Image (cartoon, coloured by chain):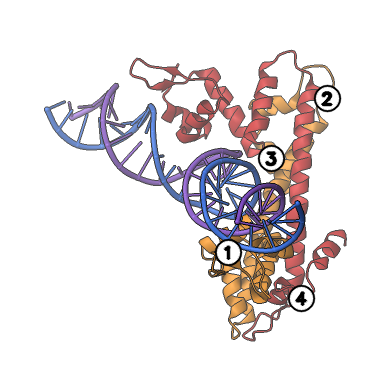
Chain colours: A red, B orange, C purple, D blue
Amino acid sequence: MSVTIGEAARATGVSAKMIRYYEETGLLGPAGRTAAGYRVYSEPDLHALRFVRRARDLGFSMREIADLLALWHDRSRASGAVKAVALDHVADLRRRIGELEAMARTLEHLAERCCGDDRPDCPILDDLAGGAGPELAEASVGE
Amino acid sequence: MSVTIGEAARATGVSAKMIRYYEETGLLGPAGRTAAGYRVYSEPDLHALRFVRRARDLGFSMREIADLLALWHDRSRASGAVKAVALDHVADLRRRIGELEAMARTLEHLAERCCGDDRPDCPILDDLAGGAGPELAEASVGE
DNA sequence: CCTTGACCTTCCCATGATGGGAAGGACCAT
DNA sequence: ATGGTCCTTCCCATCATGGGAAGGTCAAGG
């Protein structure tokens, strides 16, 4: 019925280190203990660990996961509240994607113009050194 | 000709904190000092700081920036070496973009199916709780 | 000359999520 | 009883950045 932290880790894909950390920071309540002080996990505990694991896979921060766990445990929650958390997170993901995309595009443009052979001339370094630089990134984004 | 760290920070967009950190970690050589121990920066120093700033804006890690600085200072570098660093970084950016994109798509699919009103039923929480979950993310990526 | 305010110095601490590893106790099978 | 595998707590590192304290410096103005 109850398993040790190592078994819980294997069963949920959350490392023992992280399980202790989640407990320490209050994301999860304190685990049960054996007489010898070993942590023990029952089925509902494993369920919560899998929940956290899945939320982390979706990129939620621990703060957001704490909110989601509270909503999960609140049977009278409004689904709109959950949706709001999810969509906020999506907006954050989209923003980060946009930033990375702008960087990637700028670098791809620069790399295209770099012959990439033994000669030292390099538009990439020229850009970094402040040549014509910063505007290109903006232009690339809007393109 | 020479400016203090605060002026260098304003002139390059790199915070004084970070300028000291770059020096401490060896990314940049030790700055000159006044008799009183104040750091002083000349035009070439500011140029290097702008280089670092621009590279960070493009998402390069400090390790990569160290490589780029070395290539910049090496007048007999092969542009192919610079291009390789840049394209490695682009590949890393693209990989991260793909991961975030998969998360965003999964969440958007789940949010679409969530009515988002006062009722408690919520496919988002159902998914996190392990309902039908993990496969959906994979499917979304390949879609 | 002295004060005031803006600046500089170093040093320590925090972030967020994760891993590594040491020292020591617990448990189980032989 | 012994060895191997687990558990416990505690400390440290990551990566790049910021906050802030305690104290020295400098320039301007009274």
The chain containing the residue under callout 2 comes to B
Same-chain check, marks 2 and 3: yes
Badge 4 crowding class, 10 Å Cα cut-off, few under 14, some 14 to 19, many 20 or more, is: few
Q: Nearer the viewer, mark 3 or mark 1?
A: 1
Measuring from the top left, give residue A26's x and y in whole percent: 56, 25
Q: Earlier in the sequence, mark 3 or mark 1?
A: 1
Q: For numbered disc 2, what is the local secondary structure?
A: loop
Q: Quadrant of residue B117?
A: top right
Q: Residue at x 78, y 52 (%)?
A: A98
Mark on residue A56? Answer: none
What residue is shown with label 1?
A: B38
Q: For numbered disc 1, what is the local secondary structure?
A: loop
Per the model, the C-alpha gap separating discs 2 and 3 is: 21 Å
Q: Is residue B143 above or below residue B85?
A: above
Q: Is residue D20 left or right of residue A42?
A: right
Q: Earlier in the sequence, mark 2 or mark 1?
A: 1
Q: Is residue D9 above or below residue B85?
A: above
Report the number of numbered marks: 4
What residue is shown with label 4?
A: A131
> Residue flagged by tag 4: what amino acid is it?
Gly
The chain containing the residue under callout 3 comes to B
What residue is shown with label 2?
A: B116
Mark 2 vs 1: CB contact within 8 A: no
Mark 2 vs 3: CB contact within 8 A: no
> Residue flagged by tag 1: what amino acid is it?
Tyr
Mark on residue B137? Answer: 3
Badge 1 crowding class, 10 Å Cα cut-off, few under 14, some 14 to 19, many 20 or more, is: few
> Residue flagged by tag 2: what amino acid is it?
Gly
Q: Nearer the viewer, mark 2 or mark 1?
A: 1
Q: Residue at x 65, y 23 (%)?
A: A69
Measuring from the top left, give residue B33's x and y in whole percent: 55, 69
